[in-house]
Amino acid sequence: MRLILVEDEPDLGVAIKQALTHQAYIVDWFLDGSQAWSYLEDHWEKYTLAVFDWMLPGLSGVELCRRLRGKKSPLPVLMLTAKDRMVEKIMGLDSGADDYLIKPFEMPELLARLRALQRRAPHFQACQIQIGALSLNYATHAVTHTLPNGEKQSVVLTTKEFQLLEYLMQHPNQILTRDQILDQLWEIGEEPISNVVAAQIRLLRRKLGDNNDSPLIENIYGVGYRLNAP
């Protein structure tokens, strides 16, 4: 799941990003509203959720919401602000925000509100996805593989491996190119090494016990990778 965070307080931004990354979100963090909009305007469809601070350099969080809704974007938005007067809450919600969280707040509440927004989103993503013998749970970050004898085996993955498997399972039987995977799973500004996708695929296949005779994750030479669903 990819999320855009626009927060100009460095300490708070770092704390939020760390908490979200720990929950397997891919987070693009901007400190300036104008810079955020210059990217978001043409790429909002990449995101599952958005978190905007109200008071920002450049464009405010309220203006970001208005511009998103002006483009008919249904992207769920959580507004963060120290403004707690009723008239200001109404202004934030009327601008297009879906929820409103007053600073200071506890991180578990932020995460719970984001989960609630995701459940209400137009393209709601179920808590669990199942492809053949493989099951992935978004809420618990658990991956299980059902063996031929019916035994369920837990698969321990790193955050990046979990994100990669999630992306593949969301697009079964589709060829995903290296560039598509890089664009989806690495944050803006990151410069991963050239063979990082191939390396992550190899590690993931090893942990899943994938074999070359009938591969679950297939390397389409010179094109990309495909998760073969039954």
Image: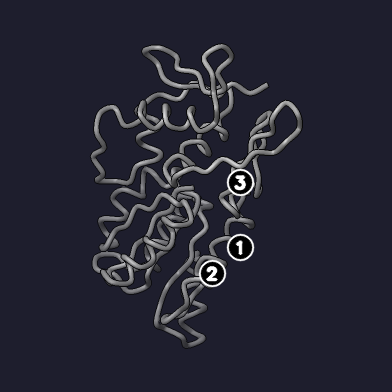
- Label 1, residues with CA under 10 Å away: few <14, some 14-19, many ≥20: few
Compared with 106, 126 (above or below) is above
Please identify, in this view, whether the residue under mark 2 or under mark 1 is nearer the observer: 1
Pointer 1 with pointer 3, Cβ within 8 A? no
In which quarter of the view is residue 46 placed?
top left
Question: Which SS class for mark 2?
Answer: strand
Q: CA distance from mark 2 to mark 3?
A: 17 Å
Q: CA distance from mark 1 to mark 3?
A: 13 Å
Q: Which residue is mark 1?
A: 116
Q: Amino acid at mark 3?
A: His
Please identify, in this view, whether the residue under mark 1 or under mark 3 is nearer the observer: 1
What percent of the width, then of the height, locates residue 154? 61, 42
Front residue (pair 213, 122): 213
Front residue (pair 170, 159): 159
Q: Which residue is mark 2?
A: 99
- The disc, 2 or 3, on the residue closer to the chain's N-terminal end is 2
Q: Which residue is mark 3?
A: 123
